[in-house]
Amino acid sequence: MKKKNKKASRIKSIIRYRKPRPDKPTPQQTAYVDPFYGTRKGIGTLPADLSFFQSLRLRLEGSNEVTRPYEQHAWVRGCVNTIANNISGVPFKLFTGETKNPSEVETGELYDLFQNPNPLMTKTQLWQATMIYLEIKGECIWLKDMPKGKEDNVAVVPLGIYPRDPVNFEPIVKNDVFVGWMYKDGKEETPLMLAQVIQFKYFNPYNYYRGLSPLSAAMMGVNQDWNAARYNLAFFENSADPGGIITYDPGANKEGLTDEQRTAIRENWENRHKGASRAKRIAILEGGLKYQQTEVSHVDMQFLDQRKWNREEIMMVYGVNKFAMTIYEDLNFATANAAAKQLWINTLIPKMNYLDDVLESKFFKYIDNGKVWSEFDTSDIKALQEDFNKKIETAHKMWQMGFPPNAINDRLELGMPKLTWGDTVFVSIAQVPAESLLGATPTSTEEESIKTKQNTAIDYDKFWVKYVAKILDPNEKKFQNRMKWYFYKLRTDQLARLADAEKTIKAAVAEKSIHKVEAFEVDSILFVEEEWDKKLKTATRPLYENIMIASGEELANELGGLFQFDLTDPAMLRFMNKRLSKIVGVNDTIRKQLRLTLMDGIVAKETIGELQNRVRTVFNFASNRSLTIARTETATASSGTRFLAMKQEGIEFHRWVTAGDEHVRTLHRNQGIVRVGQKFPNGLLAPSDPNGSPSLVINCRCIAVATQKKE
């Protein structure tokens, strides 16, 4: 008989619902089965009945502190619902392709996942639950229902997503390394791998692994308001006037009241005067009885002012204004519109950006090589839409200033389709194309060589700005992000290898003199260079391809489109392979640095935790260099592509162009014009020449432009 996989079955029970408690409902007492909390006693069959019962129970228990703020406190619930309902109502969309011209994803596993996250929730409820947990608890845990046997594979699309209460999750930390989560349900504990969990959290300066709720800063005000409400309830339940003491003056008799007499007097008083409906009744006291009020009045306590201040404090920590809470006492139409816009810009949009950021870094980037990303579509939110007529007026002014229609459309987000002629600049004289005023370009003939298309009179400053904005900047950013991701994966592998080798290191140190630890012994615990060289090439090849294609096509446009750039050309492929062989040099550099620092640590008899900190220091330095690597590699790939294409197409001369500012290196200034294939005065064949000195190549952003010998 096969044994059941207890861990797998336990995880399934976590995902679906928590196991009902053994107490069964009797005919007189119904029960409510909650998918998050199991079976709990209530007074009816509906969730509302349970809520009523719980609220009544909490009130009767007389707690002086709020333990369930979302259920117990109106202003907390209002603020949290304002955030959760608004964000969950914004369309959550998936995109692929280039950021400037993305394509919406409307089919596939990822699309289906976010349309139907789990059998218990709709797509709207997924975000509603996520935000409620975040605002109340400071964090939310998404439990991923992974396919069987692939629980540790972050590249696999989960079968479902289940938001869970973070209270039931504890981080598992081994040797200062965060390795997973422990799900605790009463006495039962289930370990979970990092790949099975996505954590959303507000940064907590007091606990690196847990989130900090906005509500924590306002809990004193919440408790004050809660107790004020309880006082009001007691006020109306006991009498319309505050409580007091009935005293007895025995006078000459000097005999006190018996227990029976005291009980009878108290019961008669309460029966006649207790409760709001019996307020202000006339009381008759005789036989030496006197009534003395003991509590201050509502006026003395300034209840209204205090409760308003508590309300303002709660709204402040949540970033919610009066308009959002339907409090219109200080608002008119103009201020209401401004308040609605302020709520979105200052509170809701930053929260949605945070959600996108977490999903990108913890989820999407691992699936299908990060080709898909998410975004909340705020285009239909009225509070964020400016008056369309004002946009049209602005667009007309920009057109008169010489901006092309497509650029205006993009800048003002008019939502109009792009025009084939929309990149043409018009001037004010009869509003005709600027090219016709500057002189038409001569028609090409069959005999015309591409050499005659070399740029002549050109504004090199504007040309450089356009080249950087179109080619260098976007590709640098992608390259930098890819390198940071790669360094993180490599660091994770190295830390794991070090943890696994703890016994080996201790044994090696014990067997011989500590000063005889050799490099080859340290090599056995370092990452496998050949394996990670392949991974780095795989990660960066698409980046090099995109840079080379964009650079080649841009050069073709500069030369009048008389040649078609081909990345499969043997010379281009050889150049790209050289760059791939060069980029893996970072692995060798990191490995050497790790070898030296770990040898020092082992000789010093440091703990595994201390050795892992040495590893982190090396990778922190590598990650900080990711921009330098990205900038240098992007410029080298782009400039090298242009140089090879110019040679193949017979361009005779090219001119060295710089940013023209104070940051330009001395040896990059005034390089002038040289024949393609000959070296510039600084000794380089072209900007970012891979054979040049590092001092001339690293971080270079210059460009060579095809031109004629005399300008």
Image (spheres, rainbow, N blue to C red):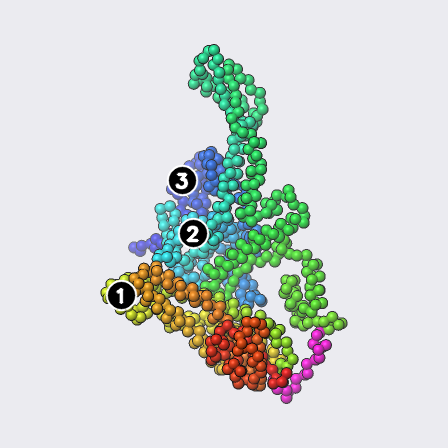
Q: Residue furthest bottom?
A: 447
The CA distance from mark 3 to mark 1 is 66 Å
- Name the residue nearer the viewer: 679 or 413: 679
Residue 514: give its label: 1
Name the mark nearer the viewer: 3 or 1: 1
Q: Check if residue 291 falls in the magenta segment.
A: no
Which part of the image, by quadrant, shows the N terminus?
Answer: bottom left
**Residue 24 has which mark?**
3
Choose between 376 and 25: the one closer to the eye.
376
- Residue 685: x and y in percent read 51, 82
Q: Is residue 323 visible?
A: yes
**Residue occupying image coordinates x 58% and y 31%:** 299
The residue that appears at 45% across and 70% down in the rendered structure is 539
Calculate the distance from the C-alpha at mark 2 to the C-alpha at mark 3. 40 Å
Q: Residues in magenta?
A: 433-452
Determine which of the numbered discs, if any, sits on residue 215 in the image. Answer: none
Read off the residue under disc 2: 207
Q: Residue at x 37, y 73 (%)?
A: 530
What residue appears at the point 54 percent right and 50 percent down from the top-left corner? 84
Which amino acid lies under the numbered mark 1 shown in the image of this protein? Ile
Q: What x and y, as percent, mark residue 364?
A: 48, 62
Three-letter amino acid code at the position of disc 2: Asn
Instruction: Please rate how many residues cluster around mark 2, counting C-alpha atoms within 10 Å: few if below 14, some from 14 to 19, many from 20.
Output: few
Q: Is disc 3 placed on a helix, strand or loop?
A: loop
Among the two numbered marks 2 and 1 on one chain, the one whose residue lies closer to the N terminus:
2
Mark 3 or mark 2, which is nearer the start of the sequence? 3
